[in-house]
C-alpha cells in the first residue's frame, strides 16, 4: 500500500498547477470583460453618454 509520506510531492505539484490554472483563467476572464466593455462603448451612440438634461435640450432644439 502507498504510504501518505510518498504522496506529498504529487499533492504539492497538483496544488501548484491548480493555482497556475486559476490565475490564468482569472486573467483571461478579466481580459474578456475588458474587451466586452470596450466593444460596448464603441458601439453605443454618443447620445447614450449624455445626461437626461442634455438629451432634453437636444430634443427641444430638434437635433434628435
Image: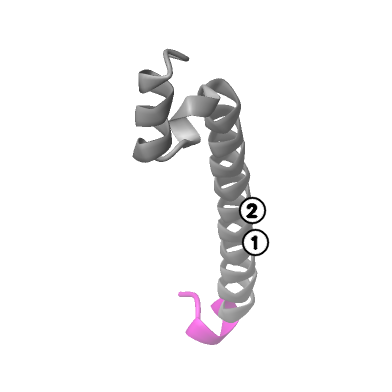
Vertical arrangement, residue 55 with respect to residue 37, above or below: above
Total numbered circles: 2
The C terminus - image quarter: top left
Q: Nearer the viewer, residue 3 or 39?
A: 39
Secondary structure under the numbered disc 2 in the rendered image:
helix
Q: Position of residue 49 (x, y in %)?
A: 48, 36
Residue 29 locus on image (x, y percent): 55, 46
**Residue 19 location in percent, x, y?**
59, 66
Q: Residues within 10 Å of mark 2 (few under 14, many from 20)?
A: few
Residue at image location 45% in from the left, 75% down from the top: 1
The CA distance from mark 1 to mark 2 is 6 Å
Q: Secondary structure at mark 1?
A: helix
- Specify the segment rendered in magenta: 1-7
Foreground pick, 54 / 38: 54
Q: Which residue is mark 1?
A: 20
Tell which residue pokes out farthest to the front in this image. Answer: 61
Q: Are marks 1 and 2 in contact (CB under 8 Å)?
A: yes
Front label number (1 vs 2): 2
Q: State the residue at coordinates (61%, 75%).
A: 12
Mark carried by residue 24: 2
Q: Nearer the viewer, residue 24 or 40?
A: 40
Amino acid at each position: 500500500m502507498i504510504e501518505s509520506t510518498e504522496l506529498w510531492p504529487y499533492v504539492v505539484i497538483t496544488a501548484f498547477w491548480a493555482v497556475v490554472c486559476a490565475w490564468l483563467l482569472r486573467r483571461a476572464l478579466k481580459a474578456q470583460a475588458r474587451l466586452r466593455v470596450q466593444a460596448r462603448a464603441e458601439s453605443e451612440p454618443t447620445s447614450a453618454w449624455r445626461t437626461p438634461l442634455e438629451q432634453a435640450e437636444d430634443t427641444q432644439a430638434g437635433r434628435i
